[in-house]
Image (tube, rainbow, N blue to C red):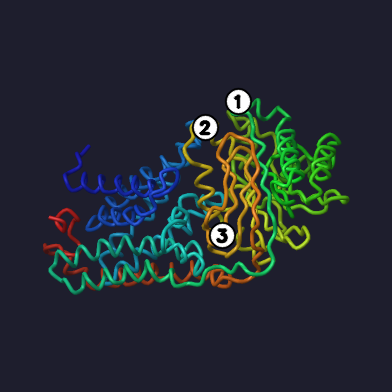
Amino acid sequence: MTRPNAATLRSWAAASAGGLLLYASFPPVGWWFLAPLGPALLILAVRGRRARSAFAAGGIFGIAFLAPLIVWLANLGLVPWLALTAIQALVFALAALPLPRLIALPGWPLYTAAWWVVLEAVRGRAPLGGFPWGRLAFGQADAPYAGWAAVGGGPALSFAVAFLGSLLVCGLTEWRRGRREASAAVCLGAVALITTPLALPAPGTSGPSAVVAVVQGNVERERTLEEQARVRNVAQNHARETKALADAVRRGEVPRPDIVLWPENSLDGDPRRNPELGSLVADSVRELDSPLLIGAMLEAPDDRAYNAGQLWLPDQGPVSWYAKRQLVPFGEYIPARSLLGGLGALQLIPRDLLPGTSTAPLEAGQVLLGDVICYEIAYDDRVRDTVRAGANLLVVQTNNATYERGIQAGQSEQQLAMARIRAIEYGRAVALASTSGVSAIVAPDGQVMDRLGTWRGGHLVEQVPLSSGLTLSEWLGVWPEVVLGAPVLVGLALSLRRSRRTAAAAQAPASMPEHDQPFTKLLS
């Protein structure tokens, strides 16, 4: 085996550093300002390198970024964590193959930012429905330029972060080449990119509003996964905390809620078929005299079930429900069950859930609930569909107990960060209801109004606006992703034409153009 040379080692070091810095921009670290350094160091790692070296650098970057970001998955075992990290790192490695060619083109920062949009589009769709966790946008709720999400959604915000990283490298390159004016122009472009969203109008707070209550019943952290699958005390925990909320209302400590939210899996069965569970929910609704959204497993034909949010109204009982549409592979269904269903922990998943189809909001008076369940919050189309269907309040029902039971590595904080970006993107309040935390109520500008930490019971009550206006992001839909990703195709076409024109010249020894030199020489 050939030992890697110094240039290769420097490339690997830059890729590793870039991945780690990008990880640190996300919760639980949350240093959002580090995010542009991730793309910048990846650019430096592959610049002037051949495709094979770019493949290696991309894979190293992906491992350094995602291994710590999703280490909470190790609560299910090392195999799921390592397998998902490896799959996602392979996506980064393959995507990095054309990156050196794009960087060699004039105006390359545009192409590299577009490349990142395409990368995230692929990661969010494949394989098995994709895994959009770790998109650049999702760590930027506190950034001054987070308003780009209201313009073009997550793709626009991710593009902005990647473009800033590219401009950083470009500006430094121009400075080293003695082109002070060009470097200054690049800096001005970066300033404009950061400050433009500050001029956008803030989400309106006039109009109707509602008092929203989130109940976090908590679960027993010390129980194993098998024990948690057997016990039937989660519903009692939420009923008990709901009674505490009702007592607080009677004492005048908080206003009576217009809607009360329980999290995903707050019931471990179907209240329509289990009289004990049905009675427990009915008592909670009667206690509060307020509409209640529960999380339940609703039975379906052929011994299957829906992971659903079910709305109960006073004096009416269950009136409507939403079923989760984006199911988790190997969590809520097993691909190729006949081959894999008997392996290890997969035996704990005795049946596949059915995906829902409806996007209609759940009506509780003037409150039109747009329900998204657990990691559906990471998928652009799942959230956009429910907003377009008329939702004026977004609700995220989630159960994070499994992923926080042992290693607490920020999974729930990362989900809250996504909810904050969705609030900015659609100008709507978001209520995040979790069994064991983090639960929160987020204002339409992405600011957290109140929150509950992990592994404790409690409730939140806040008055939030019920927004029905359209943001530009909602109006444009998927088009920002298409338009911002299109330059990659243009860049690849230009690179191919350029290669054909210079094929003959490339056979002869030639000095490497300065803009293709390894980053260590540019910085020397």
Report the residue marked by disc 3: 423
Q: Which of 99 and 319 is in front in this view?
A: 319
State the mark number for residue 75.
Answer: 2
Name the mark nearer the viewer: 3 or 2: 3
Q: Which of 471 and 516 is in front in this view?
A: 471
Q: What residue type is labelled 1?
A: Thr
Residue 479: image x %, image y %? 52, 71
Real-space CA distance between mark 1 and mark 2, rounded to the nearest whole angstrom: 10 Å
Residue at position x 84%, y 50% from top?
Answer: 314
Relative to 428, is 72 above or below? above
Real-space CA distance between mark 3 and mark 1, rounded to the nearest whole angstrom: 35 Å
Report the residue marked by disc 1: 224
122 on left or right of 190: right
Residue at position x 38%, y 61% from top?
Answer: 161
Q: What residue type is labelled 2?
A: Asn
Q: Is mark 1 on a helix, strand or loop?
A: loop
* Image quadrant containing the N terminus: top left
Residue 481: image x %, image y %? 48, 66
- The answer to which of marks 3 and 1 sits earlier in the sequence is 1
Q: What element carries label 3?
A: helix
Q: Which amino acid does label 3 sit on?
A: Ala
- Whether tag 3 and tag 1 are in contact, CB under 8 A, the answer is no
227 on left or right of 482: right
Residue at position x 66%, y 47% from top?
Answer: 214
Q: How many marks?
A: 3
- The answer to which of marks 1 and 2 sits earlier in the sequence is 2
